Amino acid sequence: MLTSSRPFILALATVFLAGCATNNNSGQPQQGGDQGQGIGKTATYGGLGALAGAAAGALLNKDNRGKGALIGAAVGGAAGAGYGYYVDKQEAELRQQMAGTGVEVQRQGDQLTLVMPGNITFATGSADISSAFYTPLNSLANSIRQYNQNSSIEVIGYTDNTGSYQNNVALSQRRAQSVVNYLVSQGVDGTRVMARGAGPENPIASNANEAGRSQNRRVEVKLTPLPQQQQQQYQQYPQPRS
């Protein structure tokens, strides 16, 4: 009896560790609530799902409990990982696609934010998309279309504090709307996207010098999980469109 159960026990240990190993596939420390906890949401839900799936698989396949456990774990681990695993995949692909473009991909919990600097987005005082901006926008549109089930998209335009506040807010709104219009022209569902002009609010650098003002002139795109869908997807792993 002890010998026959050994493959099953080894399978359980293997799949639980595999679930824990999915904590952060981006190769960078995660920001937000998961940081410093050792095992993030993806690993926690994935590991528990893998264990549950392994146990079920072993019971269903009495002739080969070890094989049944591994098969069950593959299904259970993905289902348990849920939306966190979905975001892991989108984050990794976006980081790869944005490499070398100047666009920074940030993550806070299950929210992804793309910070697009002013030197590639718009010319000074203009809301016309610069030629260097099309490549990252095309990559973003492809990602949004592929991972189309679980995010609302907010495009926020920012300026430095040069000039009047009203003019800066109006310019940042036009720039954000230009990005939204282009994403929609590339097949993104317009009902999921909104534009907002924040003007000089929320500076990320000092406005006392040109280097800082250049950083503040930016566009941010926030991909945020819809609460009800996030809850559902922790129970059933969503498949992105191919």
Image (spheres, rainbow, N blue to C red):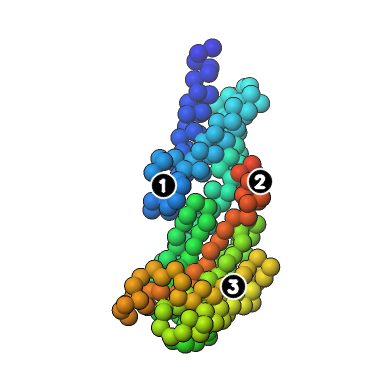
Residue 129: in sight, yes or no? Answer: no
| Image coords of residue 112 (percent x, y) | 51, 59
| Image coords of residue 61 (percent x, y) | 64, 26
Q: Which residue is mark 3?
A: 195
Q: Residue at x 51, y 85 (%)?
A: 167
| Image coords of residue 212 (percent x, y) | 34, 75
- When asked about the image quadrant of residue 215, the answer is bottom left
Above or below residue 31? Residue 72 is above
Secondary structure found at label 2: helix
Q: Residue at x 55, y 31 (%)?
A: 51
Real-space CA distance between mark 3 and mark 2, rounded to the nearest whole angstrom: 27 Å
Of the numbered discs in the image, which one, if any, rests on residue 96? Answer: none
Q: Residue at x 56, y 78 (%)?
A: 173
Question: Crowdedness of circle 2 by 10 Å Cα count: few (<14), some, many (20+)?
Answer: some
Q: How many marks?
A: 3
Q: Which residue is mark 1?
A: 35
Q: Which residue is mark 2?
A: 232
Above or below residue 76? Residue 237 is below
Name the quadrant of the N terminus.
Answer: top right
